[in-house]
Image: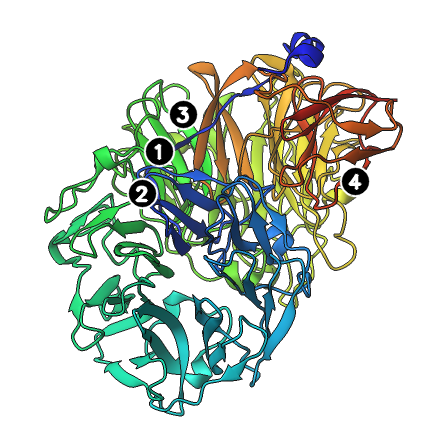
Amino acid sequence: MRYTTLLTAALLSCAALAQPATWSARGVGGGGALFSPAVNPANGSEFFIACDMSELFHSTNAGQSWSQVHFTELQGGHNSKVCFTSTAGLLYSVNYDDDISVPVKSLDGGATWTALPGNPDSGEETFSVFADYNTPNRVIISYYGEIFISQDGGNNFTSIHTALTGNGVTLGGVFFDGNNIFIGTNDGLLVSVNGGANWTTDNSTGIPAGQRIWSFAGAKAGNTTRFFALTGNSGDIYPGLVGSDYWGFFQGVYSMDWGSGSWTQRMTPNGTDFPMFIGMAENDISTVYVAGSNDNSVPIVMKSTDAGSTWAHVFNSTGNLNVTTGWSGQGGDRGWWYGECPFGFAVSAQNANVLLFGDFGFAHKSSDGGATWQQAYVDPADAHPVGSNTPAGDNYHSAGIENTTSWQVHWCDANNLFAAFSDIRGIRSTDAGATWSFNYSGLNANSTYRIVQHPTNGTLFSATSNVHDMYQSTRLQDNLLDAADAEGKILYSTDNGQTWLLLHNFGHPVFWIALDPNDPNRAFASVIHYNGGSGAGGIYSCNDLQNLASSTWTLLPDPPRTQKHPASITVLNDGSMVCTFSGRRTSAGAFTNSSGTFLYDTQGSWTDLSDPGMHYWTKDLVVDPNDPLQNTWYVGVFSGWGGPPNGLGGLYKTTNRGQSWTRISSIDRVTSCTFNPNNADEIFMTTEQDGLWMSSNVNAGTPAFSMVSNYPFRQPERVFFNPYDQNEIWVTSFGNGLKVGTLTSTGLDFPMEQHALSVYPNPAENFVTVQQYDTKFPIEIYNSTGCLVLRKTSNDTSLRLDLSGLAPGMYFLRNGARVQKLLRE
């Protein structure tokens, strides 16, 4: 039955709080690198694939559609390969939370994840996890310099190998066969014949001394156990090497039947093909695949059905011969060069016909051993048939794999939208955001950062650059921003973004453009170029925007303290302009005291209005749309590192135009905020690694913020409301594209049976102790309006929770199907 008895009050009290019940991915699908694909041996339609932008995507219908694991449970990366086991729901992988990758496991098929408690060094990066499918508690993990094994599901680990050189130890693959375990490494083939208790290094001959195993696979049929190894030069292999380092890497493919004592070379370099990964089903000793790139920089897959004696190309991209394509392919919006090379290749352990790989932009799959391939990143109904040219400018529905950065979505009118992206430039919709395309011309930059529209004639203006990831932690130093930027431009369009023309080429990255609300022919732009202080960067003004390509742009004097890293701009109703300058780091990595909030008045003078917390890494400034005098501003700030910039992040508010500030949220890094147009007390706040947050009492003296718990991605960038349907909320993100939801009144209505948790003391002051009934579920605390305010996972049945950060009131604790009402005093 549904549990409602204890929650009736909560349902009645939450009507003022609105958040989407669900989120839908929108966009063209793909566009970012995909790593470590995995196929369930027991179900060839279940896939996982990871992204270095932190997603772990999951499909249960062979890639026709994808969901993603919530970022509070697992954040994906290069090495987040999911290991299936014969125990239903038991999986292992690698979590990149807090920038340290640690081994984790799931007991519920990947919905929730917990760290392996016996991890030998939780402060060191985990480079690989391998689990024995048939002995599910047997797990092997590797660090840079050491390999460990656990026999009890990760509760305890034992060291089994230490790297022989400073290049570290790289695990190319593991083959489990009962008590016989084989690990292919750059230090040789490690062997145990007693279930992992003891290990030796195999001394079989045949692989030349200068070559080492990089990728490894094994299979067994009858009494024959056969291994395949792909090798590279010993000095080229190290933990963390990725598939894009293929050029000149490959040295050979070798096979060996266990017990023969010798490896036989099965493939040699040909100067054209550069395989990087080898794979085979564990029950087929004759069928083997390699995957990589070639001298045309397009993905390749080669197959042998005679144990490596002969090979044939089976991923035939020329003419899209055997590939059902999405928007990338011969003739498409992007050619095969965009995908370029696999970053991982998976063969189902029990079915040599089921294949999956991810590359620089896309996922492709095969269910017939490579005879045909299908794209797995757009809705299958939008795909293009085998052997046909991929048309440019077609419309696509997302399949759920959205793994590129989106900065803004703009409504030209109710049906025409243009979304600003990095890497894929931008995408366009003509049906109110249902489908998206690259059906435009003239915009060729890697990144579109900002779009504005003339209020009377509808002309669009966009700020572009070839530099992506602007003002993220990797794009703050001069050497990355000061080089000439051929796409550092402002473009304009008079046809809703279908055709873009050059308005002005600054030759340096353009991050923002803003129009004067009283005179839309007056504009300002943020241009980035420091060059030792004498660069061309800063805030530019224009007073004749109506002249388009003939318009004149003038560099304003630099505001005090600043060093030519301008960010957001807002022109106020009185004609003054307020802007932020973002972070800058020296070549040595130190943050400079050059960021903040600045006002340019109508007399042409600058005033530094920065709170001291804004001096190092300021992000967006948002003017409260409900303040007719425009005295109330909000500014997002990131904490830096290295001393003075530490601990400054959060959301800052002023009600007197910057004369004084209050930090109303202390989340470490806040990018921006947006008001709900239907509720002057409600804002949505975006963060770097803490997800999407909201407050329903932002005008209170001490506003309360709660995570929007069902938004699954760690770094939303900005929030936009559809001006033609203000209950529709869109969220852009740094690496997860676009998501859209519809605002609804949300309360606590858990679909669960009625059970109570043991919680004491209750009422609570600063701490409570909770007795968990099932440690595979997290402990969650929801406030009375239905927002998740605390989540904690632990393998301990007794858990002490710190509630000191929660305001007094009524809360509900949840552990799986069990809920308890809690009073916070």
Q: Is residue 251 above or below residue 445?
A: below
Please state which of the two labelled residues, at mark 4 or mark 1, is closer to the viewer. Answer: 4
The span from disc 3 to disc 1 (Cα, nearest Å) is: 13 Å
Labels 4 and 2: the sequence-earlier one: 2
The span from disc 3 to disc 4 (Cα, nearest Å) is: 60 Å
Say if mark 3 contacts mark 2, CB within 8 Å: no
Q: Which residue does the image show at 34% across and 40% down from the upper left?
A: 29
- Amino acid carrying mark 1 in the image: Asn
Labels 4 and 1: the sequence-earlier one: 1
Say if mark 4 contacts mark 2, CB within 8 Å: no
Callout 1 crowding tier (Cα within 10 Å): few <14, some 14–19, many ≥20: few
**Quick one: which residue is furthest to the front in this view?**
223
Q: Position of residue 722 (x, y in %)?
A: 45, 20
Q: Which residue does the image show at 79% across and 28% down from the upper left?
A: 758
Labels 3 and 1: the sequence-earlier one: 3
Mark 4 — residue? 798
The span from disc 2 to disc 1 (Cα, nearest Å) is: 53 Å
Please state which of the two labelled residues, at mark 4 or mark 2, is closer to the viewer. Answer: 4
Name the residue nearer the viewer: 225 or 676: 225
* Secondary element at image label 3: loop
* Secondary element at image label 4: strand
Please state which of the two labelled residues, at mark 3 or mark 2, is closer to the viewer. Answer: 2
- Amino acid carrying mark 4 in the image: Ser
The span from disc 3 to disc 2 (Cα, nearest Å) is: 45 Å
The span from disc 4 to disc 1 (Cα, nearest Å) is: 70 Å
Q: Which residue does the image show at 32% across and 50% down from the upper left?
A: 363
Q: Quadrant of residue 353?
A: bottom left
- Amino acid carrying mark 2 in the image: Ala
**Mark linked to residue 62:** 2
Name the residue nearer the viewer: 804 or 113: 113
Q: Quadrant of the C terminus?
A: top right
**Mark linked to residue 454:** 3
